[in-house]
Amino acid sequence: MNTTFKTVSSSHITISELMLPSHTNFSGKIHGGYILSLLDQIAFACASRFSGNYCVTASVDTVNFLKPIEVGELVTMKASVNYVGTSSMIIGIRVEAENIQTGVIKHCNSSYFTMVSKDKEGKNAPVPGLILTNLKEVSRFQNCVKQIALKKEREYQKSISTFGSIENILSLNQYNVKVELQ
């Protein structure tokens, strides 16, 4: 059992970047792929700060694009460790965009990345335990526990599903799909 513990606040990372025309997609909004790249960077920094090790992205568990980001807005990302396992951490990230002329701030994205701590040989390395100091941190930790359980249940259901069964094929008529097996 790990005897080293760190607070959630010791993992806090904040980055800000002005959104430029070169970051846009074909509709003139900031490209989601660019935001994903920034999210991965801050998740790495947060996990590495907390663990004291090099960290890799194991999964991007949730990315909710809530509002578009415009050219000229100042994007601020705030990350913290919400959950720790043996060598893994779930990093919660909040993305806000500020119109720097009006001062109006909007919540644009919430994301959760699972990061894994690595030692110098590239093997999984243990991470410190997590000290929860307020009810928000406890709530975030409990939400991660629920999400992990749901993820395991989905994987289990996939492993026992019989997608090709007649019953499953016939049930597809309730969806916007046409089955034309050959």
Image: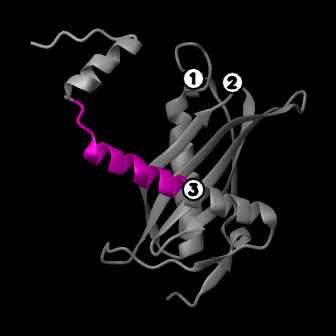
Question: Which tag, 3 or 1, sits closer to the chain's start?
Answer: 1
Residue drawn at x 58%, y 54% is: 42
Is label 2 in contact with label 1 (beta carbons under 8 Å)?
Answer: yes
Which quadrant of the view contains residue 73?
A: top right
Its colouring scheme is one colour
The structure residue drawn at horizontal position 73% and vertical position 64%, both measured from the top left corner, is: 137
**In this orientation, which residue lies closer to the viewer: 12 or 88?**
88
13 drawn magenta? no
Label 1 crowd (10 A; few <14 / some 14-19 / many >=20): some
State the CA–CA distance, disc 2 to disc 1. 7 Å
Q: What secondary structure is found at the residue carrying circle 3?
A: helix
Magenta segment: does it hold 151?
yes
| Residue matched to label 1 | 24
Q: Amino acid at mark 3?
A: Lys
Residue under label 3, please give it: 146
Q: Quadrant of the C terminus?
A: top left
- Residue, far left: 182
Q: Which residues are magenta?
A: 146-163
What main secondary structure does the magenta stretch of the protein show? Answer: helix
Give the residue number, with chain letter if any, for mark 2: 71
Q: Would residue 168 be seen by someone viewing this image from the given angle?
A: yes
